[in-house]
Structures are given as C-alpha cells and as structure tokens.
Image (spheres, grey):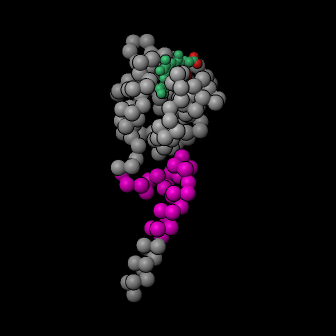
Amino acid sequence: MKRPMLFLAVFSLIVGGIQCDNKIVSDCLTCAEQQPAGQKITLSEIQQTIFNPQCISCHGGNQPAAGLNLSEGLAHLNLVNQQSTTAAQVRVVPNNSSASYLVWVLEGEKAPLMPPTGALSRTKIDSVIAWIDRGAENN
Ligand code: HEC
C-alpha cells in the first residue's frame, strides 16, 4: 500500500523540478520558493556583488545621484516602495519586477541605462529581478 504513494511523491518531485527549469525565474515565484535556501538571492548578495562595486561611487555619500542612496543598510529604504525622483515610477514594487524602475534602468530600454558606462551581465540583472519577484525582502 505504501509503495504507490512513494512513487507518486517522487514522480511529482521530478515533474515539479522539470517544470521549474523550463521557466525563467521572474515568471516562477512558486518554483523559486521551492529552490533550496542557498539558491535564493538575498539583498545582501546584491549589495556585495552589484551595489558596492558598481553603483555606490555615484549612489552613495552625502549627495547620491538622483537622491538614491544604495549604500549598505540604506538600499532597501531607498528602493522599496519609493517614488523615483526622475520618472513617474516606483523604484522597486515588491513582487512586480516589470513595474520596478530599478529594472528599467538596469535594462536601459525604457529608461537611462545604469550603470551609465555599460549594462550589468544578464545574470546580475536576473538576480535583481528574482529578488524583487520574491517580495524584495530586506534579507
Ligand atoms: C557614474 C555615476 C553612476 C553610476 C555608477 C550609477 N548611476 Fe544610477 N544614476 C546616476 C545618475 C546621474 C542618475 C540620474 C539620471 C537621470 O537624471 O535620469 C541615476 C539614476 C538612477 C536611478 C533612478 C533613480 C530615480 O529615483 O529616478 C536608478 C534606479 C539608478 N540610477 C540605479 C543605479 C544602479 C542600480 C547602479 C549600479 C548598477 C547605478 N545606478 C550606477 C549615476 C550613476
């Protein structure tokens, strides 16, 4: 009696995994949540790998560009649910990367490209998108 149940459990795990792989992260909130905790992109990882090396030279200090301070400890406060100072957009809308102005500037199609010297890699942009679509937590 127990075997069919076990088979079913293993089978649905495998199928679930395959469905996950076929979707891009930003379309796949529930799949993203099924990933092991170690694979979740956190704001601190984004801080270390993107904001610190590539943004805070302009978006830090006493007079950050566009009034946007991306320094450690301030980035969440400055981004999430905050109105852009240069466009009629919200900088980060939790769970809605496509409405988030931060993503617009990183992609540079509907807004001036950031960083101005050249776009981040697709992987880095996707990690920001994934963080937003998981709720833009202060994690
Ligand atoms: C060389 C300086 C410089 C660097 C580096 C830079 N920015 Fe900017 N950023 C600016 C300036 C200047 C503006 C204002 C642009 C405008 O007036 O449209 C701006 C605007 C923005 C805005 C819009 C803010 C708002 O409220 O409208 C966002 C979001 C942004 N930058 C994110 C970033 C991110 C993320 C990085 C790093 C990946 C980055 N920027 C790197 C200079 C910079």
- Looking at the image, residue 139 lies above or below residue 1: above
Q: Where, by quadrant of the figure, is residue 70 drawn? A: top left
Asked if the magenta segment contains residue 14, the reply would be yes
Residue 3, percent across and down? Answer: 39, 83
Q: Residue at x 45, y 67 (%)?
A: 13
Residue 74, percent across and down? Answer: 38, 25
**Where, quadrant-wise, is the C terminus in this rendering?**
top left
Quick check: 25 left or right of 4?
Answer: right
Q: Residue at x 53, y 36 (%)?
A: 93
- Looking at the image, residue 139 lies above or below residue 115: below
Residue 111, percent across and down? Answer: 62, 26
- Looking at the image, residue 56 lies above or below residue 39: above
Asked if the magenta segment contains residue 16, the reply would be yes
Which region is colored magenta?
12-37
Chief secondary structure of the magenta span? helix
Q: Is residue 89 visible?
A: no
